[in-house]
Image (cartoon, rainbow, N blue to C red):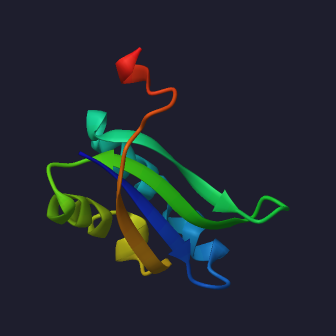
Amino acid sequence: MLFALLCTDKPDSVDLRMSVRPDHLKYLESLGTSLKAAGPFTTDEGSPTGSLVIIEATDRAAAKTMAENDPYAKAGLFASVEIKPWKWLIKNPETR
């Protein structure tokens, strides 16, 4: 099952995000095929304000564990994380 992790950064946390980013990227790579897509939300000027991560997990509890193990989450970057089941209907490369 796919889940969208909608992560919102705490205010004024760009420096924290940038310092933890290398570990965050390594963590995402370690998810292998469970990671379907990921990238930051930004302001109109391009400054990061959060993250969207699409993962495959057996259930919500597994998705929550994956979210909690992200170095960004462990560093306290996020003000909130929403976990929502998600269906990839359009342009899903696995259904072409």
Q: What residue appears at the point 45 percent right and 80 percent down from the top-left corner?
A: 80
Would residue 40 be found to the left or right of residue 21 on screen? right
In the image, residue 29 sits, relative to residue 69, either above or below, namely above
In the image, residue 6 sits, relative to residue 59, either above or below, namely below
Give x and y (percent) for residue 21.
52, 59
Would residue 39 be found to the left or right of residue 33 on screen? right
Q: Quadrant of residue 10?
A: bottom right
Q: Quadrant of the N terminus?
A: top left
> Farthest residue toward the right?
45
Q: What residue appears at the point 83 percent right and 62 percent down from the top-left corner?
A: 44
- Name the foreground residue: 9 vs 23: 9
In the image, residue 66 sits, relative to residue 31, either above or below, namely below
Would residue 5 be found to the left or right of residue 19 on screen? left
Q: What residue appears at the point 49 percent right and 77 percent down from the top-left corner?
A: 77
Q: What residue appears at the point 51 percent right and 26 percent down from the top-left corner?
A: 91
Give x and y (percent) for residue 40.
60, 56
Number of marks in picture: 0
Q: Quadrant of residue 50?
A: bottom right
> Farthest residue toward the top?
96
Give x and y (percent) for residue 33.
28, 33
Q: Quadrant of the C terminus?
A: top left
